[in-house]
Image (cartoon, rainbow, N blue to C red):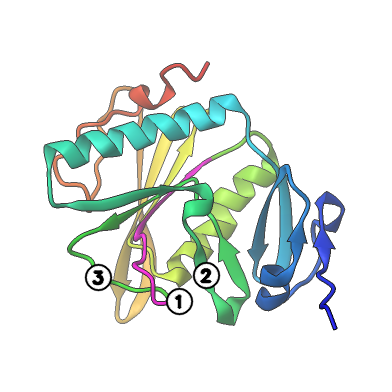
């Protein structure tokens, strides 16, 4: 007997689901889906300015890889990368993420963990809350070492660096604007500036 798959779409935003139900579901095309601590989040696929900024960040990372060979193993975008945590019923897809050669950390599925994740903030208060609050907590729980929040409207990059004090993990926050070079513990000698990230995005 054939199994009937649950079909989900934008009307299901906010629906409670298990991680297995999410993985087994049939997704209506044209939308972005994530499972956030057992709650389905359905959002519009971002527009061209958003993905121009993502592309600019990708190019900055690629330039760093060329200048510092042997550091970056690969760079992934969107659905190329999953941050999964079964105990939180969590399945997130960052806009961009980096796997490093010398950091062999594995995720719960046995894959190399992209320990640097990037989100480009979409317009709207819900998008800001998701990237600045929800994913801040989620990515700490997953085990990221750095989380970059790139805000085109504010023209600001916030770099969160994982720190542990007495065995308790938290984020150390750094903020960069204008022509400032973005400083990353994971990318020593990184030369990319905040201003370069907005090229061709307006």
Q: Which label belongs to residue 88?
A: none
Q: Residue 13's quadrant in the figure?
A: bottom right
**Disc number for residue 104:** 3
Which one is earlier in the sequence, the residue at label 1 or at label 2? 2
Residue annotated with mark 1? 109
User: Which residue is drawn at the image coordinates 83% and 78% (left, top)?
Assistant: 2
Q: Which residue: 63% across, 29% down?
A: 47
Magenta stretch: give its range.
Answer: 109-120
Disc 3, disc 1: CB below 8 Å? no
Q: Earlier in the sequence, mark 3 or mark 1?
A: 3
Task: Determine the secondary structure under disc 1.
Answer: loop
- Figure check: 89 above or below 195: below
Mark 1 and 2 residues: CB-CB less than 8 Å, in contact?
yes
Q: Mark 2 and mark 3: span between their CA atoms?
A: 17 Å
SS of the residue under disc 2: strand
Q: Earlier in the sequence, mark 2 or mark 3?
A: 2
Within 10 Å of disc 1 (Cα), the crowding (few <14, some 14-19, many 20+) is few
């Amino acid at each position: 007997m054939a199994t009937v798959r649950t079909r989900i779409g934008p009307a299901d935003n906010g629906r409670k689901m298990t991680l297995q139900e999410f993985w087994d579901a049939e997704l209506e095309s044209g939308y972005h889906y994530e499972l956030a601590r057992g709650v389905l989040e359905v959002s519009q696929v971002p527009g061209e300015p958003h993905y121009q900024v993502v592309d600019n960040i990708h190019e900055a990372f690629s330039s760093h890889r060329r200048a510092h060979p042997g550091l970056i193993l690969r760079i992934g975008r969107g659905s190329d990368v999953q941050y999964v945590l079964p105990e939180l019923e969590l399945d997130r897809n960052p806009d961009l993420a980096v796997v490093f050669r010398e950091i062999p950390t594995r995720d719960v599925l046995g894959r190399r963990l992209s320990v640097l994740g990037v989100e480009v903030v979409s317009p709207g208060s819900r998008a800001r809350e998701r990237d600045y609050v929800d994913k801040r907590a989620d990515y700490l729980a997953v085990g990221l070492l750095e989380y970059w929040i790139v805000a085109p409207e504010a023209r600001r990059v916030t770099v969160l660096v994982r720190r542990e004090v007495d065995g308790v993990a938290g984020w150390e926050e750094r903020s960069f604007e204008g022509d400032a070079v973005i400083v990353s513990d994971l990318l020593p000698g990184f030369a990319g500036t905040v201003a370069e990230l907005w090229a061709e995005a307006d």
